[in-house]
Amino acid sequence: MRQVVLDTETTGLDPSQGHRIIEIGCVEIENRRLTGNHYHCYLNPDRDIDAAAIEVHGITRQSLADKPRFPQVEAEFLKFIDGAELIIHNAPFDIGFLDSELKKTASDATSMSSYCSVLDTLVLARQMHPGQRNNLDALCKRYEVDNTQRQLHGALLDAEILADVYIMMTSGQTSLALVEEATEISHRQQKARKFDPNRAPLSVIAANPDELVAHKARLQEIDSGSTERCLWLGLESE
């Protein structure tokens, strides 16, 4: 499975008001592993950049004067993302800008949906952590992803950070799948074992009252920190 983590920086917030993309950063993931392949470019927007946007990413119009325009990088960019699943945090923002840029070119490409599917990690994070902060910095803290280099936003840096966050966010599913697969293979490879009918009976050691209290407290702790009810509590209440 090929995925591309993508981020953009822009001159402002709304492409319908003439704002443009000034940076694109992409990081490739294949079979849930970073490949080391990436796509990155700065773009000349041929317009001023809002002061509020400069405070976010620190990119000025003067620094982009010698950079290419979007039509000059369009083919290379589309080739990189073609057929992949894009992973984007707050995808409508980036996709809206990219679709706007595509419509301004003379090529036949008019929308990103013609080239790839999209997974929005903001939507995923809200499903996994309802009622909590789910911006990229909050997710880095939650999943212990190092973002100390992120003094300002940058498309490539943010894509690299989001790639780490996404892998951590979804690692539980993959780990479980790998465990199940390994268990199934192990079961197939094991030979049937026969126990000695004359073996001594197994001893049963019951938990003492203090251990039962500690066990109950731990189950309640798991229950309060989970999005789903702790199954063991449900079984014990039956």
Image (spheres, helix red, strand yellow):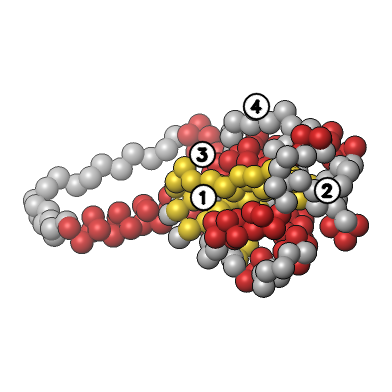
Q: Earlier in the sequence, mark 1 or mark 3?
A: 1
Direction from residue 82 to residue 127 in the image, left or right:
right
SS label for mark 1: strand
Spatial CA span between label 4 and label 1: 22 Å
Quadrant of the rendering where the C terminus is positioned: bottom right
Towards the viewer: 208 or 70? 70
Marks 4 and 1, the one that precedes in the sequence: 1
Element at badge 3?
helix
Picture residue at 62% right of the left edge, 71% below the top: 114
Q: Which residue is mark 1?
A: 28
At x 77%, y 39%, the residue is 65
The circle drawn on residue 44 is: none
Q: Quadrant of the image for the N terminus?
A: bottom left
Of residues 155 and 174, the one drawn nearer to the viewer in this rendering: 155
Residue matched to label 3: 215
CB atoms at circles 4 and 2 under 8 Å apart?
Answer: no
Q: Secondary structure at mark 2?
A: loop
Q: Residues within 10 Å of mark 3 (few under 14, many from 20)?
A: few
What amino acid is at disc 1?
Glu
177 lies above or below 22: below
**Residue at image mark 4:** 148
Q: Nearer the viewer, mark 4 or mark 1?
A: 1
Numbered disc 4: secondary structure: loop
Q: Residue at x 19, y 47 (%)?
A: 201
Residue 159 lies, in percent from the top left, at: 62, 44
Q: Which residue bears the numbered disc 2?
A: 46
The amino acid type, in three-letter code, at marker 2 is Asp
Q: Amino acid at mark 4?
A: Thr
Q: Position of residue 48 (x, y in %)?
A: 88, 43
Distance, label 1 to label 2, CA atoms, is 29 Å
- Note whether 162 is above or below 151 in the view shown: below
Residue 187: image location, x then y, percent: 23, 58
